[in-house]
Amino acid sequence: GRLGGAEMSYGSDADVLFVHEARPGHSAQEAHRAAADVVGELHRLLAVPGPDPALRLDTTLRPEGRSGAASRTLDAYDAYYRRWSQDWESQALLRARPLAGDPDLARRFCRLADTVRYPMTLPAAAIDEIIRLRGRMRRERIPRGVDPTRHLKFGPGGLTDVEWAVQLLQLRHGRQVPSLRTTSTLDGLRSAVLAGLLGEAPAGDLQAAWLSASRLRNASTLAGWPRPDVLPDRPGALEATARAAGWPPDGADDLIAEHRRLARRAEAVVADVFARERTAEFG
């Protein structure tokens, strides 16, 4: 998620995976219990009331989701990914990076993740599945009655569109192009340009839309708007968001027009990236 990409915004949660191994002289069961205790205590500490909002941990990206173990050994992750891994899990691992704990174990997990997130090939069926999931997220995550063009995250040309276009290039070419192996969206864009996978102008359109949506998302939070993923539809809240984003007091209408212009350009680039990569796979 955005934590892995070092792209956290106000209100972001933290998508995390926990991995452990038994110390010499201790059983696997003891290690599992100790790891579960650490995970539980971390959740508790982060939920303690304080002057700042609590950081919400999201562990549902782990193998088997909510029904899976809170923490697994490296061997258990390896066995799961070899047998059960789905395309969306490979995509999610593109953002995985070490955060805390034993450096050697973290390096070994990242080496394992590399075998999953940078496959030798990405079949057309996998690209179709990514396209299907993208459409499903848009249908399910944009609330009923909300204009999709105002949704900063899941709307056409929004944050998710840009990020998934970059991630598709990483899944397709990361094995052959090491510079694409980054958790950062913007670094991935720059690497795609240098590798000749994306032109400078299209990459610039994606970057401009992503930066603008990220800025507006933070601005709406600072303005007190309760749904930061959606541009406010109330005049007062929209004007407050515009001011927080650096627009002049009377710039709310211009903000909307600029957002839609950038999103339309990004949407066109995203559609081209998906179509080109899918066609190239068949070719």
Image: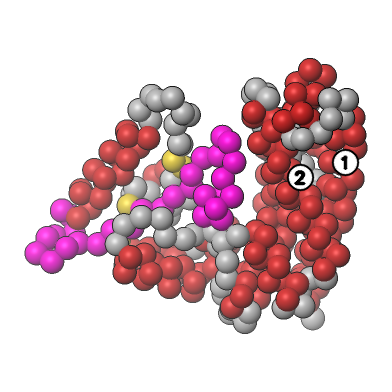
Quadrant for the C terminus in the image: bottom right
Which element is circle 1 on? helix
Residue 187, position in %: x, y? Answer: 65, 64
| Amino acid type shown at disc 1 | Glu
Q: Which residue is mark 2?
A: 212
Verify CB contact (< 8 Å) between mark 2 and mark 1: yes
* Residue at the image position 64 percent from the left and 29 percent from the top: 221
Left or right of residue 197, residue 20 in this image: left
Please, is residue 1 above or below residue 190 in the view?
above
Which percent across, then down, holds residue 118?
56, 73
Res. 170 image quadrant = bottom right
Whole-angstrom CA distance, mark 2 to mark 1, is 9 Å
Q: Quick one: label 2 or label 1, which is nearer the N terminus?
A: 2
**Prevailing SS of the magenta stretch:** loop
Residue at 79%, 50% (x, y): give it. 209
Whether residue 83 is visible, yes or no, is no
- What residue would you read off at disc 1? 258
Whole-percent x, y for residue 50 in the image: 40, 25
Residue at figure coordinates x 13%, y 66% from the top left: 24
